[in-house]
Image (cartoon, grey):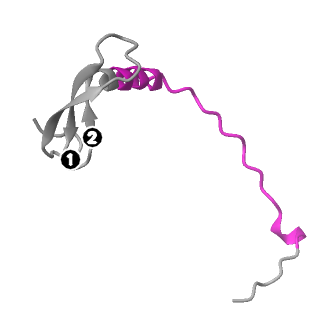
């Protein structure tokens, strides 16, 4: 198996859930040897939920009118280099 981020080598690991809220204390996941990216079912599920919340139709953005300022009315001091 290769990493989706860097195409590196994925290693299977055993992970322990100290709280064990949803069942077994031990779970299996994959970790990239190069970049450390993890691939497991719980992380993937949360990423999919987050991606769905971001995907929404773009709203029309209104741009306010630009206001022309008369430059002749203000005095501008030359800047020293």
Q: Which mark is residue 46?
A: none
Q: Nearer the viewer, mark 2 or mark 1?
A: 2
> Dot 2: what SS?
loop
Q: Position of residue 30 (x, y in %)?
A: 20, 32
Q: Which residue is mark 1?
A: 6
Using residue 68 as the reference point, say whether residue 60 is left or right of it: left
Q: Position of residue 81 (x, y in %)?
A: 69, 89
Q: Are the two marked residues, 2 and 1, in contact with CB atoms closer than 8 angstroms?
A: yes
Q: Is-magenta flag for residue 69?
A: yes
Front residue of 67/43: it is 43
Task: Work out which residue is located at the far top of the displayed protein and give it.
Answer: 23
Q: Which residues are magenta?
A: 45-74
Q: Could you tell me which residue is drawn at 33 percent across and 26 percent down? A: 43
Kindly indicate the quadrant of the structure image that contains residue 25. top left
Q: Nearer the viewer, residue 55 or 15?
A: 15
Circle nearer the N terminus (2, 1): 1
Q: Is residue 26 magenta?
A: no
Residue 78 x, y percent position in the rendering: 78, 84
Decide which of 74, 48 is in the foreground and name it: 48
- As helix, strand or loop, the secondary structure at mark 1 comes to loop
Q: Position of residue 12 (x, y in %)?
A: 15, 33
Q: Residue at x 30, y 24 (%)?
A: 44
Left-right relation of 66 to 16: right
Per the model, the C-alpha gap separating discs 2 and 1 is: 9 Å
Specify few, some or many for label 2: CA neighbours under 10 Å numbering under 14, 14-19, or 20 or more: some
Name the residue beneath numbered marker 2. 37
Number of other residues with Cα within 10 Å of mark 1, as a class: few under 14, some 14 to 19, many 20 or more: few
> At 30% across and 26% down in the image, what residue appears?
16
Is residue 66 shown left or right of residue 13?
right
Q: Establish if 43 lies above or below 65.
A: above
Q: Is the residue 28 above or below the residue 67 in the image?
A: above
Q: Residue at x 40, y 13 (%)?
A: 21
């Amino acid at each position: 198996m290769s990493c989706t981020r860097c195409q590196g080598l994925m290693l299977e690991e055993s992970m322990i859930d100290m709280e064990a809220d949803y069942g077994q204390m031990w779970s299996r996941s994959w970790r990239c040897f190069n970049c450390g990216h993890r691939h497991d079912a719980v992380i993937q599920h949360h990423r999919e939920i987050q991606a769905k919340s971001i995907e929404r139709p773009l709203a029309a953005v209104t741009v306010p009118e630009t206001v022309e300022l008369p430059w002749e009315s203000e005095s501008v001091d030359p800047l020293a280099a």
